[in-house]
Amino acid sequence: MLQKPKGTYDIYGDKTLEMLYFRKLAEVLMDKYNAKYFETPIFESSELFHRGVGETTDIVSKETYDFKDRGNRNLTLRPEGTAGIVRSFIENKLYAESLPLKIWYLGPMFRYERPQAGRYREFYQFGVEAFGSNDPIMDAEVIGIVVNLFKILGLKGVSVNINTLGDKESRENYRKALVKYFKPYLKDLCDDCQRRYEKNPLRILDCKIDSDNEIMKKAPKMIDYLNEISKKHFDKVKEYLDVMGIDYKVNSNIVRGLDYYTHTVFEVQADIKGFGAQNTLAAGGRYDHLVEFIGGPSVPGVGFALGLERLFLALQAENIDIKEKICPDVYIFGTDIEQKGNVLSLANDLRMAGFNVDIDYNGKSFKSNFKYADKIGAKYIIIIGEEEVKTRVLTIKNNITKEEYKIELDVVINFLDEKLGEEDED
Ligand code: HAM
């Protein structure tokens, strides 16, 4: 039997309900921030991610799905959303329109990682990217979106961890300090860290293997290498988070696995008991040079992305059910196959009048039709026979209370409107 590729999953049943609920929630929340929805291609030129995310990052060096199309172009399935949004922002010259511009997206991303709970090869991210403000107020606003989202969902076991990587100058000073510090300990670090030392020493701090190592714990801290501008920026971010009543911790080990960050970086972790190792629900930060780096003008940006699978796991761990079942208002079937046309025509009229309608396509028996209506959760059942067609009076059955009504065909819509409206008010 053919099977789905490793690290992927199908969305159906309860998963569909969760996904659709989340999308609706995101739409409503994003309107509140005047953020605009974007969709960019699932694949982009490989160069975009190499340049954007960074050649030395794990994502680009080990995890991308790269392929050549039939025209010999080097393409990559997007491992994250930021680079594509930045490309679109530049290509569509959105920098020439009124800024700041807040953008949101929701879609599949692809990384060749070792699959485990909360880690997939195809996974969904909800993300926000805000362009055109280098003010720390935007950093706080973006962090606030994640916090508010969790609040709306009622998720409690989350903590916001923030750090700063400073501006270019501070980062360079810090890089030098790290190189000097790690040099005598190089042989004690893992192979990956030895490589990182050469290419991007900051990433050593992000190492999962060496994280408990004493050498790591005593490493210089970014906070001590910040210049005035960077310090001020970070202080303001914290001040604005305080103003919004957002709890956070400053965690100097957050350096992030992507190269594009400057100043603020943050991760929102699930602190739920028994939650797996993949506990970073959302992560992001500021990227003041990425737009320029990818070939656009100098426009600052800040954003985050949230992994939907991990969010759903966290909600499950806290017994929060977001599955909103959508059931048909009406199920219609005919007494015999002669009625199929009448069934179809009534269903069509009711759907166009705004009702959710399902019908019997297969000519099932009475018993099977009632069973099926129960299974799909139909609220009302309409049976059409010769008599109904002749008299133009329908028997409508409330499938929950089992009450029956005789209603003239011409006023069926009014009747259902009234009845279903009453139920909504209950
Ligand atoms: P990231 O930290 O690579 O950042 O990913 C963000 C979130 O995506 C993670 O915290 C996690 O919830 C989810 N995620 C990542 N990889 C996987 C996976 N293999 N399976 C399931 N979930 C996963 C970014 O992607 C940046 N683009 C965030 C950003 C936006 N920074 C600025 N703007």
Image (cartoon, grey):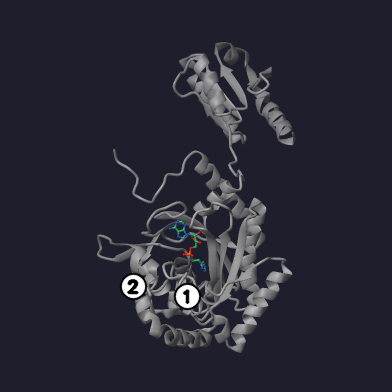
The location of residue 411, given as percent across then percent down, is 68, 25
Q: Which is more foreground, mark 2 or mark 1?
A: 1
The location of residue 104, given as percent across then percent down, is 55, 61
Type of amino acid under label 1: Glu
Relative side of 45 to 306, left or right: left
Q: Quadrant of residue 302?
A: bottom right
Type of amino acid under label 2: Asp
Kindly give the residue lying farthest to the front in the view shown. Answer: 214
Read off the residue under disc 1: 214
Looking at marks 2 and 1 on the same chain, the residue that comes earlier in the sequence is marked by 2
Q: In this view, does 426 lie above or below 91?
A: above
Q: Which mark is residue 191?
A: 2
From the image, which quarter does the N terminus lie in? top left
Identify the element where label 1 is drawn.
helix
The location of residue 368, given as percent across then percent down, is 50, 18
Which residue appears at 42% of the width and 53% of the height?
116
The location of residue 333, given as percent across then percent down, is 53, 20
Which residue appears at 30% of the width and 41% of the height?
2
Q: How far apart are marks 2 and 1 (CA)?
A: 17 Å
Identify the element where label 2 is drawn.
helix
Q: Is residue 126 above or below residue 9?
A: below
Q: How crowded is mark 1: few (under 14 residues within 10 Å), some or many (20 or more)?
A: few
Give the camera-side residue of 22 and 334: 22
